[in-house]
Amino acid sequence: MPQSDRKFLVIADDSSECRTALYFAARRAQATGAHVSILATHQPSDFNHWIGVAETAKREAESAAETLLESMAEDAEAVTGERPELLLREGEIRAVISQMLEDDPLISLLVLAAARASEGPGPLVTALARGKGLFSSRAVPVTVVPGDMTPEEIDALV
């Protein structure tokens, strides 16, 4: 498959559903010649009155996010054969995603995973369903992958 500049954006978290979305995005990217981008965010700390504590909390949050990104990058690379783009940003997840979609015209698909049925769909999917979307000036298609899909079920789709 010829390579394109298109990117499939996956949002990193420590859930098993996130790994399912990543696998879907990687298989779809492999099948269509696109690339995978993985975004992790961390919240700014609330320790404004103790600067040393705030800096330590920020470093720990960044370190945890970087570790998660590296782990997910290995999973994606095992499928696609290429290193995904890793993105680490500070801020509230919906605002960061919205800004990413606005700033990067190469992002052509946002891949989210729905939480397992008994847990509800998850915060990002719920926000989209309620019309509190992630889009400002540029809409991007969203694929919501059921969190309990197996790799074999995903392989059959792509």
Image (cartoon, rainbow, N blue to C red):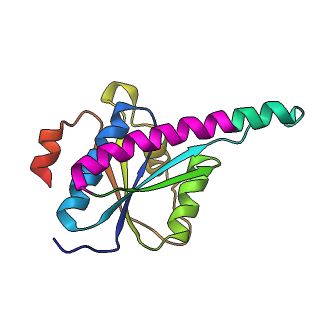
Residue 60 coordinates in the image, percent (x, y):
64, 33
- Residue beneath the point at 21% across and 60% down: 30
Can you see residue 45? yes
**58 left or right of 82?**
right
Residue 85 percent location from the top left of the image: 42, 58
Residue 47 location, quadrant:
top right
Q: Residue furthest top?
A: 118
Regarding residue 46, the answer to whether it shows in the image is: no
Q: Position of residue 14 (x, y in %)?
A: 44, 33
- Main secondary structure along the magenta-highlighted residues: helix
Magenta range: 59-81
Q: Is residue 138 left or right of residue 111?
A: right
Total of numbered circles in the picture? Answer: 0
> Relative to 59, is 1 on the left or the right?
left
The answer to which of 31 and 81 lies nearer the viewer is 81
Q: Residue at x 24, y 47 (%)?
A: 78
Q: Please state, as top left, top right, bottom left or bottom right, where the N terminus lies in the image.
A: bottom left
Q: Is residue 33 left or right of residue 22?
A: left
Q: Tell me the residue at 17%/39% (across/down).
A: 151
Q: Position of residue 42 (x, y in %)?
A: 61, 42
Quarter of the image with the C terminus in it: bottom left
What is the residue that sits farthest to the left in this orientation? 156
Q: Is residue 153 magenta?
A: no
Q: Is residue 73 magenta?
A: yes
> Residue at 37% of width from left, 39% of height from top?
18
Please state which of residues 69 and 116 is positioned toward the viewer in this rendering.
69
Q: Is residue 88 above or below residue 19?
A: below
